[in-house]
Structure formats: C-alpha cells, structure tokens
Amino acid sequence: MVRDDLERRRRRVATLFTLAVLAVWIVVGIVEPPYLLPGPGDVLERLGAFVIDPHMWVHAGASLLHVVVAVAGSILIGGCLALLAYYLPVFRLAVHGRISPFLNSFSGTGWVLLAVLWFGLGDFTVVFSLAMVLIPFAIINVRHGLDSLDPELIEMAKSFGHSDFKRFRLIILPALTPFLFSTMRSSFGVSWKALLTAELFGGDKGFGRLFNVARQNYDTPLVVTVIVIIVVAVYASDRYLFEPAQARLSAHYEAL
Amino acid sequence: MKHSSLAASIAERAIGEGLPLVFLLAWWLTARNMPDFILPGPVQTGETLLQLFIDPAFVGDTLISLARVVASVILAVILGGALAALARYVPSSAYAVQRRVLPVLNSFPSVGWAILATFWFQPDSGSVIFVETLILIPFCAIALTQGIADMDRELLEMGASFSRSGFKIAWKIALPMLLPYIMSSVRIAYGVGWKIALVSELFGVDHGLGYLMLRAEVIGNTAMVFASCFAIVIIFVAGEKLIIDPLARRFAVH
C-alpha cells in the first residue's frame, strides 16, 4: 500500500517535472530569439517538415548505416583481437595491455581529423573514426565474456574430443552471445554520440553534416530538432528494443 | 611444466613490449615514403609532442585543457552526487532524476551541447567547462547512486544515535563510506573528460589542445594532430597513475 503510494508519487513528480521543463522551454522560447533557443512549437514544426522531406531521410539513413557498419566492424575486429589473446595467451599483454588501453585513451576527435587527412570526406572516414572509438569496448566486453567461461565445460568438451572449431561453435560462441549483445547495446549508444563529430568534420551526409550546415546558418531549430531525434531514438531503442531483448537473452541463457 | 610456463611468460612479455617497437618501426618505414601532411614520421611527431610540454607557445594550450577537464570533473562529481542524493533522500523525485534527467543527459550528443554553447555563450573556458560538465554528470550520478545505495544504514543509524548534527554524520560517517565511489566516478569522468575535451574545444575557443588540433588539421600539420592526441594519452595515463590510483588505494574499502 505504502509502496503503491510512493510509486504513484514518483510518477506524478516525474510528470510534473517534465511539464515544468516544457513550460520553462516555452517561456524562454518566447522571450529569446529563435537562434538562441527555439520554442517546442518551432521544433515540433521543424520535426514535421523533417519527416516529410525525403532529403532528410537520406541523411537519417546515412547516419544509421554509419552506426550499423561501425558497430558490426568494431565487434568483429575487437572480438577477433580478444579471441586471439584467449587462444594464444602470448598475445595477452599485447592485446589487453597495449592495444586496448592505447585505443581506449586515444581521442575520438583525433581519429576523425586524422581520417579526414588520410581518406578525405566520405562514408569510410566516418565509419573508420567510429570503429576506432568502439573497438576497445568490444575487446573489453568479449574479454569479460571469455573470462567468465566455465572451465569445467571447456574441459568436458575437450574430453569428448571436440575440435577447437567445434568447441568454439558449440560452447564458446553461445556463451559469448550475451556479452556480444551487451557490446552491441553499449556500442550503439556510444556511437550516436561520436557519430555527430565524425560526420560533422568527415562526412558528406548524415546528421552531423546537417549539424554543420545548421551551425553555419545559425539554424538553431534544426540543431535542436536533430538533437531531439537522436535523444528520442537512442532512448527509445535502448528502452524498447535492446533492454527487452537483453532480458530475454539473459533469461534464455540462465535457463540453459 | 614450470619451465614451459616461464617460457610462455617471457614470450608474452616480449611480444607485449615488442609491439610498440614494431609499431614505431612500421610507422617510421611507412612515413619515409609519405608526404608529411599524410603521415609524419615518429621523430617529427615526437618533437612536436615535446613542444606541447616545454614550448611556452604551446604549453599554455596543454595546461588550459588540463585545467578545464579537472574543473569539469570536480563540478560533475558535485552535481552528479547532488542528483544521486536527491533521488535517494527525496524518494518522490527518484523517477524525475532516474527516468527523465539522467537518460536525456546520457543520450544528448556531446557535439550538440558544444554547438548550443556557441550560440548561448561567449566561447571561452566557461563555455567549454559547461559542455564538459553536462556530458560528465550522468557518469558520476550513476556511480554515486550505487555508492549511496551501498552505504551501511546501521552505521548511519549508530552515528545518529551519538550525534544530532547532520553535518557531522555526513562528514564523519557518510563521506568516508562514499569515498571509494567518489574515486570511481572521478576515474570514469577523468577518462571520458579527456575523450570529449577536444569536442568542446573545437568551436569558437582560441586556446586548448582541441583548438590546436583543429587548426593543425586545417593547415595540414598532421604532426601536430598526432602530437595533440598523444599528449592527451600521456596526460590521461599520468593523471591516472600519479593521482587517481594512489587516491583510490588510499580510500579503498578495507
């Protein structure tokens, strides 16, 4: 009873908070010129125009493609490096003590600017810069997955005479699946943040490119519209796509 | 058996330590046949890197970036801690903090803050710190929420039975219990701070490593782009090994 009451109060306060923020935004939007802060009405109007403009869908599609290719590429490369260190322990220090910390501390913006100098503007520059940011996440997550493998299960598979490849396919890969999924989930969130910088300096299309044009034209409504789209897309995909999928995956693997 | 494990350990160390040398050699060989604006050699990059730490013309940029990151980390820990405490001690505000403020801050693109800051403020250290702090707050708030949840309630109750002063209980009992989590949020924020420091220095400001890097890219000074990135790696590692690690050990839970 007390818990239900607290739950109701929490929901009410959260709703009131959202309404208060919207009210402040409306007031500031009226008081200040649109180039400083467009009101929610202006942004909604711009959002409507964005949705019916096919040109904007090209940018949205390009950004999504950049993210998907970079996430897939980084999981593949990072996963291979982590597996290299697992199967050939002589590479452990090189992978986990050298490559991973170096990539992890190297600035994402640095990769973008270097990629522009090396490859010019284009899709490859954006995907390369994003992948370089994401690879250490994949190495670290896959390593955690490999560390958590049940050694007795591996021993049992060995005693049954399974080949290395069969052991990988039947035991290691299924055990790694939740970790690969969590890598994909966290990489997806991080990549949207890094994407805009990569596209802003290195891309010829995508949300970052739109940002660049909007910045030069002081088109704040477009900047805020793109931000709203990204915040909503990242939040909604995590909450309604990745979270339930991960819960289902965890339940499946715990039941095994 | 013992002999083979020793050999494996030596081989692992040799490959680990040899990798940077192989990388440097490959870099040097490749750069010999490339123009400087595509790939400067390691020696030229090393000289430029040294300039960032000893040349008075550049050392100011390095120090100002460091100062901005440190200020942002401190502010983010304070504000993130305040949000975590609000959600815990004013229970009705928990969803407003955890389901509204933090998810929005967490998914807000950093370059979005950077561009909005150029519209809202004069580009200076204040606007850079504003951007960096807003990006770091969710990381600190999440770590400190866990810290507050893990605090020993019985110890706090015992403190309350000995003293009525809330400040004394917070200072003498709650803060020491939170210190490991504060250090963990400092560590996370310091790492992320250096990654996003450059983004917030790319627009408008005329000092800092981000500004130097963007200017270098525009004029094709790739050695400076590399040097700025390596300078960040060095400062990041030095800060972690010389300051954060010893502090974290000092405040670790025993």
Image (tube, coloured by chain):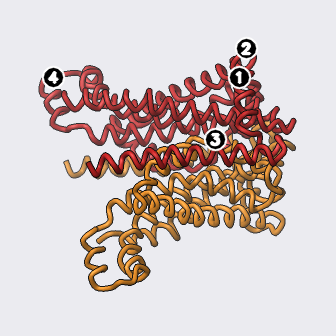
Chain colours: A red, B orange
- Subunit bearing disc 1: A
Query: How far apart in space, not on screen, are marks 1 and 4 (Cα)?
Result: 62 Å
Which residue lies under the disc numbered 3?
Answer: B109
* Sequence-first tag of 1 and 4: 1
> Secondary structure beneath disc 2?
helix
**Do tags 4 and 3 sit on the same chain?**
no
Q: Amino acid at mark 3?
A: Pro
Q: Nearer the viewer, residue B81 or A22?
A: A22
> Secondary structure beneath disc 4?
loop
Query: How far apart in space, not on screen, are marks 1 and 2 (Cα)?
Result: 12 Å
Residue count near mark 2 (Cα–Cα under 10 Å), binned few <14, some 14–19, many ≥20: few
Residue at image coords 74%, 36%: A223
Residues tagged 3 and 1 counted as in contact (Cβ below 8 A)? no
Query: How far apart in space, not on screen, are marks 3 and 1 (Cα)?
Result: 21 Å
Which residue lies under the disc numbered 1?
Answer: A48
Q: Residue B165 in the image: state x and y as whole percent.
A: 39, 83
- Subunit bearing disc 3: B
* Tag nearer the camera, 1 or 2: 1
Quarter of the rendering containing residue A245: top left
Query: How far apart in space, not on screen, are marks 4 and 3 (Cα)?
Result: 51 Å
Q: Residue A48 in the image: state x and y as whole percent.
A: 71, 22
Residue count near mark 4 (Cα–Cα under 10 Å), binned few <14, some 14–19, many ≥20: few
User: From this viewpoint, is residue B127 visible?
Assistant: yes
Quarter of the rendering containing residue A231: top right
The label on residue A54 is 2
Q: Residue B234 in the image: state x and y as whole percent.
A: 61, 59
Residues tagged 3 and 2 counted as in contact (Cβ below 8 A)? no
> Secondary structure beneath disc 3?
loop
Q: Amino acid at mark 2?
A: Pro
* Sequence-first tag of 2 and 4: 2
* Tag nearer the camera, 3 or 1: 1
Which residue lies under the disc numbered 4?
Answer: A161
